[in-house]
Amino acid sequence: MLKDICEDYQLSLIEANIISFLYNNPGKDTAGDIVELRMLSKGNVSKAVEELIQKSLLSRTPDTADRRKIHLALRPEARPITDRIKR
């Protein structure tokens, strides 16, 4: 299912996985959460997150209590992709 989305929106499979993860897990919004729960490598997640930020599909916000943590959020531009994932 994600392969069709990847082709339509020029995403890699890991980028689509990250979008899907953030959409389906609202409380888990850090790269560490993605690495831990999806069992992906840190390097691949880090690279994919940077690509998604460059494509304006993700934004990052530092944690107010722990500045080592960076929270990821889907931007409105990712809405068509999340709508397809939901279907």
Image (cartoon, rainbow, N blue to C red):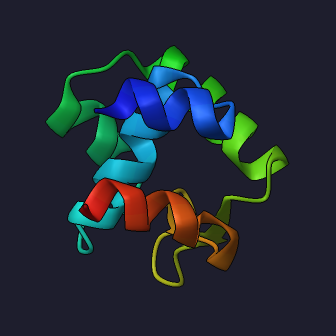
Residue reaching furthest to the right: 54
Instruction: Please report the residue visible at 36 percent of the width from the left and 59 percent of the height from the top.
Output: 22
Does any portion of residue 27 appear in the rendered image?
yes
Where in the figure is residue 72, as x and y percent of width and height? 52, 63
Where in the figure is residue 64, as x and y percent of width and height? 53, 84
Q: Nearer the viewer, residue 13 or 51?
A: 13
Instruction: Please report the residue visible at 64 percent of the width from the left and 25 percent of the height from the top.
Output: 47
Q: Is residue 39 left or right of residue 79?
A: left
Instruction: Please report the residue visible at 41 percent of the width from the left and 24 percent of the height from the top.
Output: 3
Where in the figure is residue 52, as x and y percent of width and height? 68, 44
Q: Nearer the viewer, residue 70 or 68?
A: 70
Image height of 6 relative to 86, above or below? above
Q: Nearer the viewer, residue 51 or 31?
A: 51
Image height of 83 relative to 68, above or below? below
On-image quarter of the C terminus: bottom left
Q: In the picture, residue 37 is in which quadrant? A: top left
